[in-house]
Image (tube, helix red, strand yellow):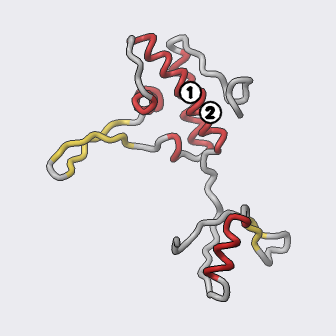
């Protein structure tokens, strides 16, 4: 059993209690393991992480379009992870850094991947990808369009 859980919720109108989302998932755990126990609760404003729709848009729209572009341009069919490396480095602007572990050199991306961005950062990266792909005559539809899933 986990020692802690992160829940999302909001105060009721008079701020005397918190209404948690998806309590049906956690209720059995709370009743069985934490009933009659004192809890330490920290309350903070939730960060707006990228949405499930944004994640779906990235994986179902952006990655396949860029993957198709790379195959047409190079004659090589890259897998999704290779395509995402291209997106992160060439279109979003992340840099690679060398890190040495146990005397072996590795290269890793420095910066936030799409899944680590909040909604605003995700949209900024999406616009960068769209802008740079448009320079190569490849149109990535907006997520509000018929094909964008948002």
- At label 1, counting other C-alpha atoms closer than 10 Å, the crowd grade (few under 14, some 14-19, many 20 or more) is many
- In depth, the one of 32 and 48 nearer the eye is 32
Residue 89 makes an appearance in the image = no
Q: Give x and y (percent) for residue 123.
A: 61, 36
Q: At 42% across and 27% down in the image, what residue appears?
A: 79
Q: Position of residue 104 (x, y in %)?
A: 17, 45
Image point (62%, 87%), residue name: 38
Query: In this rendering, is residue 7 above or below 125?
Result: below
103 vs 74: above or below: below
Q: Residue at x 64, y 45 (%)?
A: 51
Quarter of the image with the C terminus is top right
Name which residue lies at 59% across and 81% down. 40
26 and 113: which is toward the camera: 26
Q: Is residue 1 left or right of residue 98?
A: right
The image quadrant of residue 21 is: bottom right
Which residue was labeled with disc 2?
A: 57
Instruction: Name the side, left or right, on which 94 lies relative to 145.
Output: left
- Which residue is under mark 1? 62
Q: Where residue 8 sits in the image (x, y, percent)?
A: 67, 63
Q: Is residue 53 left or right of residue 90?
A: right
In this orientation, does residue 87 appear? yes
Are the residues at dot 1 and dot 2 in contact (C-beta closer than 8 Å)? Answer: yes
Instruction: Decide which of 56, 16 is in the foreground and name it.
Output: 56
Q: Mark 1 or 2 closer to N-term?
A: 2
- Direction from residue 147 to residue 83 in the image, left or right: left
């Amino acid at each position: 059993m986990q020692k802690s859980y992160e829940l999302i919720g909001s105060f009721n109108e008079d701020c005397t209690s918190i209404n948690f989302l998806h309590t049906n998932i956690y209720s059995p755990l709370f009743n069985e393991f934490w009933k009659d126990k004192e809890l330490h609760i920290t309350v903070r404003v939730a960060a707006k992480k990228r949405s499930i729709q944004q994640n779906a848009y990235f994986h179902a729209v952006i990655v396949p379009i860029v993957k198709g572009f790379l195959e047409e341009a190079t004659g090589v069919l890259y897998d999704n992870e290779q395509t995402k490396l291209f997106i992160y480095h060439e279109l979003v602007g992340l840099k690679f850094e060398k890190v040495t572990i146990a005397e072996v050199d590795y290269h890793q991306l420095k910066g936030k991947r799409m899944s680590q961005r909040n909604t605003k950062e995700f949209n900024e990266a999406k616009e960068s990808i769209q802008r740079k792909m448009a320079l190569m005559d490849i149109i990535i539809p907006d997520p509000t369009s018929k094909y964008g899933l948002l």
